[in-house]
Image: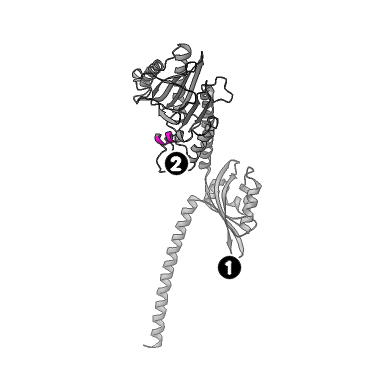
Amino acid sequence: MNLTNLIKEELAATLQRLEQVEIGLKSRQQELNDRIAILDRFALISETDTRGVITYANPRFCEVSGYTLEELIGKPHNIVRHPDMPKALFKELWETLKAGQIWQGEIKNRRKDGSHYWVLATVGPIRDSDGEICRYVSIRVDITAQKALQKANTELEESLLQNLQAAQFFQIGLMPILRPHHQEPLPLPHFVIWKPNQIVSGDFLWHHTERKRTILVAGDAMGHGVFGGMLSVLFMQQMRSLVELSGVWTPERLAAEIDKNLSQLFRIASDHPITVDGFIGVLDMARRRLSYTSLKGKAYLVREGQLQKLHSYPFSFGEGLGASAEEHEVELQPGDRLYILTDGLSNQYQKSGDKPLGSKRVADLILSLQSVPFHQQKDAFLTEIHRFSSQTVQSDDILLVGMEVE
């Protein structure tokens, strides 16, 4: 083969390789164009020189800001700065860029018509072949709708919080024992732990004293928050009407009457049972006697270091069985301690995935604290509750009442 033919073959091979390179370049260019087109539909992109003067703006930036490309080119980027944005933020931005680093943050900008829009901006430096910063590129995502939704959610949360706080104010208004320096104390040394799960509680404590006798009602209404709080207020109002207006003082009759009233009301409101677990007791300290009726209520008597669970029926107020609940009596002795509580403490989890405290461990806890002087027991119980639940959130409303017979 002569030299001419060799040159022709080499030239043909070179041309073929060039064609393949050209095809590859066209493919890469098309891919790049597609990527830019997608990015242009999604992001607001601009470039500036090292002084912050705009040298490029994509169509999306022009669309959102309200400026034409001609109006933006050659202008400082602060043409879209909103006066609400603090100067310190832009000082931090420029310090970050000049240090050769990438800055990211939320920025409120101003459109040409004076309205505003929010962006999540990512700004970074571009370097030349010598490694020197020659311009800055900013890629921003319009988050105006998200910020508006965030603002609406914040306003809604604030409104709900105010309403819950107002509801708690009225709920506590029916439970004066929870107020500091309440004017109608129980006839025994006592403490009350009331820890709502959601500001307003389904757990409640109502009492009324008359002629050296005190009616004490501790209850756990179905649900938490506003729903549980509403049921608790309804229950307490029923009790007030029966006791203060109708003069009903026996726990047995109170249980029957309030269960009948609530059952009728709840049947109208819902096809499903709406219930309240509760303990109704009458303390007659002249006779040192506790009369009580308990419908799924929880109460314990501790005497001489021995713990006894007081009788409770396995049905709730609202199920229509209250008339079958009989009254029980306990003769009290000096040194006796009474504990009335809801299931909030036994339902508390120590940590996620673990078993709740449970009734047996609650009873063991009560017994374990009997060596603690009664006036220190509230703090002791709070310490134990915190120790047990410190690794998780509160899972239920909590109510615990302690009393000591003198």
Left or right side of 363 for 111: right
As displayed, is residue 213 above or below residue 299?
Answer: above
What residue range appears in magenta? Answer: 360-364
362 falls in the magenta region: yes
Q: Position of residue 93 (x, y in %)?
A: 62, 53
Nearest the eye: 136 or 311: 311
Query: Which disc is residue 129 wearing?
Result: 1
Nearest the eye: 134 or 300: 300
Residue 52 in view in this figure: no
Q: Amino acid at mark 1?
A: Ser
Quadrant (top left/top right/bottom left/bottom right) for the N terminus: bottom left
Nearest the eye: 167 or 112: 167
Residue 84 in view in this figure: yes
Q: Amino acid at mark 2?
A: Gln
Q: Residue furthest top?
A: 246
Nearest the eye: 310 or 208: 310
Q: Earlier in the sequence, mark 1 or mark 2?
A: 1
As displayed, is residue 223 above or below residue 260?
Answer: below
Report which residue position mark 2 lands on.
Answer: 350
Label 1 or label 2, whichever lies nearer to me, is: 2
